[in-house]
Amino acid sequence: MSIARRIEKLQRDFLWGGLEEEHKFHLVNWQQVCTPLYGGGLGIRDVAIFNKALLGKWLWRYSMKPTSLWRQVIDSKYGGQGNFWCSNRVNTPHGVSLWKHIRAGWDVFSQHISYTVGDGARLRFGHDVWCGDLPLRSLFPSLFQLAQASEATVADLCQ
């Protein structure tokens, strides 16, 4: 059982019956309990969703703080992707790594962000969503296969 589920079980047990062993009836479902106060709920956070939000904040910090010491440690340990938004994937089969679990959420996290082109140095032309709702490699797969510089940035191709 995950830690989030254990915490949720403690919350449920406390709310619906204290810490006694006897079974009590639930007068409100858990989804309603986790609904915000303005929506008529009790405003208790869903621990699993809140944890994903906190992990997502670390992914955001990684991309926004390129000179921070902790990012330099991550980049030296796992490898960085230059001036881009996330580190390399962590593929080590042994050990438990905090960054490994944070980095595993990048694919979902990246679907909920948008980029501003700026000078184009941090956006990969075919891989990042900067023109429309999908990356250009998804919109034009046959052209992407023909590209000689598939990892080029927007700045590289606009010069």
Image (cartoon, rainbow, N blue to C red):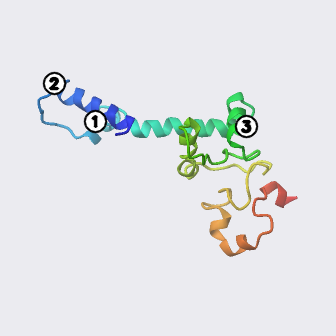
Q: Which residue is mark 3?
A: 76
Between 88 and 108, which is closer to the camera in this rendering? 88
Query: Is residue 46 shown to the viewer in this render?
Result: no
- Tell me the residue at 26%/39% (across/down): 30
Separation of residues labelled 2 and 1 (CA atoms): 20 Å
Which image quarter holds the C terminus? bottom right
Q: Position of residue 71 (x, y in %)?
A: 69, 34
Q: Is residue 85 left or right of residue 3?
A: right
Label annotation for residue 156: none
The residue carrying pointer 3 sits among few (fewer than 14), some (14 to 19) or many (20 or more) residues within 10 Å by Cα, namely few
Q: Residue drawn at (71%, 72%), measured in percent from left and top? A: 145
The residue at 55%/38% (across/down) is 95
Task: Determine which residue is flagged by label 2.
Answer: 20
| Residue furthest right as drawn | 159
Q: CA distance from mark 3 to mark 1?
A: 44 Å
Question: Tag 1: Cα neighbours inside 10 Å, few (<14), some, or many (≥20)?
Answer: some
Give residue 51's position: percent from left, percent from top: 45, 36
Q: Nearer the viewer, mark 2 or mark 1?
A: 2
Q: Secondary structure at mark 1?
A: helix
For the residues bearing labels 3 and 2, Cβ distance under 8 angstroms: no
Q: CA distance from mark 3 to mark 2?
A: 50 Å
* Quarter residue 127 falls in: bottom right
Upstream in the sequence, badge 3 or badge 2?
2
Name the amino acid, label 1: Val
On the image, the x and y values in percent for residue 99 come to 58, 38
> Furthest-top residue in view?
19
Going by the numbered disc 2, the residue's amino acid type is Glu
Q: What is the x, y in percent for residue 101? A: 53, 41
Which residue is the site of mark 1?
33
The 10 Å Cα crowd at callout 2, few under 14, some 14 to 19, many 20 or more, is few
